[in-house]
């Protein structure tokens, strides 16, 4: 039994384009193969979501689907059968050139027939085919959105991914899985446009990779800057010392903490954040917030020393608690 594309996306039949797009993004993230490795059910669901979105996200194919249901892919043929005759002929408001109420569509790029002809070719060659505009020999790509999840380290260095193309998206393609390159510096919400060639200009398509960067256990990202909390022993915070700070690159930087460094103090390390997605070699900064760690399991002598310190500070005017 054929699936209802509206039900697949979880939207009503009167859903707006925005509703459909948001539903697709939400479900695609949930069922994407990167999020569900080796899960055949999720992979099958992801393909259904893509097929439903590709059909309902374009006004022409959605109209055909609403009108003809499971037979929407044959909408042109059904319409032509209702008029009879040549599959490249369409009805006209009046007689022209002795052809009665039908006329032949031509490849005159300035003709108003190009919209209908382009739709016909789009249905014949798949939803990823490009259609010509009404003015000039220009191709307009069908853009397919594909959600991709990467780690923060991959966002720093750049990454590659294998992505599945929607069914029937490229005519003459050599498979439905391709490798794509994600540039350094992308963030959650970034879009990476990739042109996917087929056999011939009309079979090309564009992918728009919708990026999600996973939360990191250590670093928090704000724009191009990174924030990290660094534990510092009490003695080093009081007397001053060298702090080893890990960076997103996997290296460590020595940070000199001055004596009497307060808990919560933040240090700025320039150029140790995320790369700016501009190709100019610029980087954000790394902000290091100190978290003073109190000693545990004190020895008797250590307790005596802390007691001496407490007595000393209480006995000196102006010290007390602080």
Image: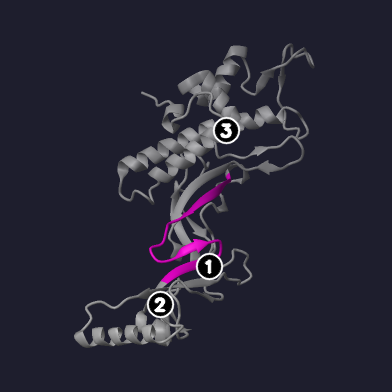
Instruction: List x then y, in percent, for residue 171.
Output: 53, 41
| Mark before the other along the chain sequence, 3 or 1 | 3
At 37% from the left edge and 38% from the top edge, which residue is drawn?
Answer: 45
- 203 is higher (above) or lower (below) than 315: above
Question: Element under label 3?
Answer: helix
- 67 is higher (above) or lower (below) than 254: above
Image position of 293 (left or right of 15): left
Within 10 Å of disc 2 (Cα), the crowding (few <14, some 14-19, many 20+) is few
Circle 1 sits on which residue? 274
Question: Element under label 1?
Answer: loop
The part of the image, by quadrant, that contains residue 128 is: top right
The tag on residue 215 is none
Q: CA distance from mark 2 to mark 1?
A: 41 Å
Look at discs 3 and 1 and give the one toward the viewer: 1
At 62% from the left edge and 45% from the top edge, which residue is drawn?
Answer: 201
At 46% from the left edge and 35% from the top edge, which residue is drawn?
Answer: 51
Is residue 67 located in the magenta-colored stretch of the structure?
no
Quadrant occupied by the C terminus: bottom left
Instruction: List x then y, in percent, for residue 256.
Output: 47, 85
Circle 2 sits on which residue? 321
Instruction: List x then y, in percent, for residue 266.
Output: 50, 73
Task: Mark yes or no: residue 158 visible.
Answer: no
Q: Main secondary structure of the magenta part?
A: strand
The part of the image, by quadrant, that contains residue 291 is: bottom left
User: Could you tell me how many numbered marks the image carries?
Assistant: 3
The tag on residue 17 is 3
- 226 is higher (above) or lower (below) than 28: below
Q: Which residues are magenta?
A: 204-229
Q: CA distance from mark 2 to mark 3?
A: 63 Å
Q: CA distance from mark 3 to mark 1?
A: 34 Å
């Amino acid at each position: 039994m054929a699936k209802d594309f509206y039900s697949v996306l979880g939207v009503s039949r009167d859903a707006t384009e925005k509703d459909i797009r948001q539903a697709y993004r939400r479900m695609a993230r949930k069922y994407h193969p990167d999020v569900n490795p080796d899960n055949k059910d999720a992979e099958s669901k992801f393909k259904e979501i893509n097929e439903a979105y590709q059909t309902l996200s374009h006004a022409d194919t959605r109209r055909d689907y609403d009108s003809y249901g499971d037979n929407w892919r044959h909408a042109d043929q059904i319409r032509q059968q209702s008029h009879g005759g040549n599959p490249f002929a369409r009805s006209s408001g009046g007689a022209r050139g002795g052809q009665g109420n039908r006329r032949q569509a031509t490849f005159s790029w300035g003709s108003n027939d190009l919209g209908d002809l382009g739709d016909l070719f789009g249905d014949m060659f798949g939803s990823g085919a490009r259609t010509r505009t009404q003015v000039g020999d220009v191709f307009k790509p069908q853009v397919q959105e594909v959600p991709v999840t990467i780690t923060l380290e991959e966002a720093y260095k750049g990454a590659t991914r294998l992505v599945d193309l929607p069914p029937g998206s490229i005519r003459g393609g050599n498979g439905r899985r391709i490798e794509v390159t994600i540039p350094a510096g992308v963030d959650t919400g970034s879009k990476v446009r990739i042109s996917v060639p087929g056999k011939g200009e009309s079979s090309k398509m564009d992918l728009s990779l919708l990026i999600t960067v996973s939360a990191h256990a250590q670093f928090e990202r704000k724009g191009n800057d990174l924030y990290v909390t660094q534990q510092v022993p009490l003695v080093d915070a009081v007397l001053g010392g060298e702090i080893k700070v890990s960076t997103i690159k996997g290296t460590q930087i020595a940070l000199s903490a001055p004596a009497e460094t307060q808990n919560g103090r933040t240090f700025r390390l320039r150029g140790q954040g995320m790369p700016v997605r501009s190709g100019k070699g610029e980087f954000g900064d790394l902000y290091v917030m100190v978290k003073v760690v109190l000693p545990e399991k004190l020895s008797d002598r250590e307790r005596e020393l802390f007691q001496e310190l407490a007595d000393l500070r209480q006995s000196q005017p102006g010290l007390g608690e602080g």
